[in-house]
Amino acid sequence: MSTTSTPTEAASPKVTLPLLAEKKRRGEPIVMVTAYDLPSAQVAEEAGVDLVLAGDTAAMTVLGYPATTPVTLEEMLVLTKAVRRALRAPLLIGDLPFGSYERCHEQAIASAQRLVKEAGCDVVKFEGPAADRAEAIISAGISVMGHLGLTPQTATALGGGFKAQARDAVAAHKLVDDAVALEAAGCFALVLEAVPAEVAAAVTERLRIPTIGIGAGPATDGQVLVLNDLLGIFEEFKPRFVKRYAHLRREMVGAVSSFATDVRARRFPAEEHCYAMGAEERDRFLASLAEDA
Ligand code: KIV
């Protein structure tokens, strides 16, 4: 079976929150990817995905930081605006970066408003179980996607590390309780990252809102991958849950190497890449240069 998908026709309907809820009810898998700039968002749009997250994984996959924590709201706004310019049908999720929502409800609301007002996000996402924070943002009129399990912004600080979460009964039960609390707070969907498949299945069964898994097994209502992992552009490391559907970094290195080889061998540019003057203008030009000599 082929692993490549077929682009959908250009006029797919705009994805809405009721449509996502309907997909869960119908058992229709929800597709989500990250995007960080115009071309990656255009690819997501053309491929017909449902949700696009302008994720803080941009910190590592695009901006070269060693973790997601250093990326600022200002940087996220620049990237997210570029994504917005390319997207029509998929729902655009703005990602609240580390330090932009933890201090108090007012800070979280102000940051969420910037993602909506300045970058044109449809909704926002933040990491962690703070149901009261979600409720505050939702009360301010902005829909929120939750994110539980591995939460990279605090993975180091909380000692959990970049590894699967909720692997013992107590932690798994707490995750279910946190998920139920986020749903009760009004979240419209929940990302579950790097948790055992059984735990994700239990959460998915208990919630009315859709769950979107990344390293959370097959039972979630949807799946998300980081685009640069999926495309094989980011090759620094590969978590177990990543499936590479292409190896674009190899392709990109090959293309740039070919360009370098052509330039060094004086094969590029060829005639078809050059602009020409009309013969008459060329003769006048050469004559004018000769007069100067
Ligand atoms: O920021 C991000 O890319 C994410 C995904 C891993 C879901 O949160």
Image (cartoon, rainbow, N blue to C red):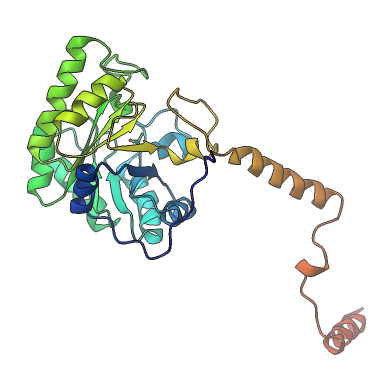
Q: Could you say where residue 144 lies in the image, as x and y percent from the top left?
A: 18, 43
Q: Which residue is at the front of the view, 279 or 208? A: 208
Q: Residue at x 7, y 35 (%)?
A: 184
Q: Could you say where residue 122 lies in the image, as x and y percent from the top left?
A: 24, 54
5 left or right of 115?
A: right
- Which image quarter holds the C terminus? bottom right
Question: Toward which corner of the image does residue 133 lie, by quadrant?
Answer: top left
Instruction: Locate ligand 1 by image quadrant.
Output: top left
Q: Is residue 104 visible?
A: no
158 left or right of 76?
A: left
Q: Could you say where residue 84 lies in the image, as x and y percent from the top left?
A: 35, 57
258 left or right of 12?
A: right
Q: Which residue is at the front of the view, 72 or 195? A: 195
Q: In the rendered image of this protein, does residue 236 appear above or below residue 4? A: above
Q: Which residue is at the front of the view, 15 or 158? A: 15
Q: Is residue 221 visible?
A: yes
Numbered label tally: 0
Q: Which residue is at the front of the view, 74 or 170? A: 170
Q: In the rendered image of this protein, does residue 214 appear above or below residue 248? A: above
Q: Residue at x 19, y 46 (%)?
A: 21
Question: Toward which corner of the image does residue 165 lie, by quadrant?
Answer: top left
180 left or right of 114?
A: left
Q: Residue at x 37, y 32 (%)?
A: 68
Q: Could you say where residue 257 lies in the image, as x and y percent from the top left?
A: 74, 43
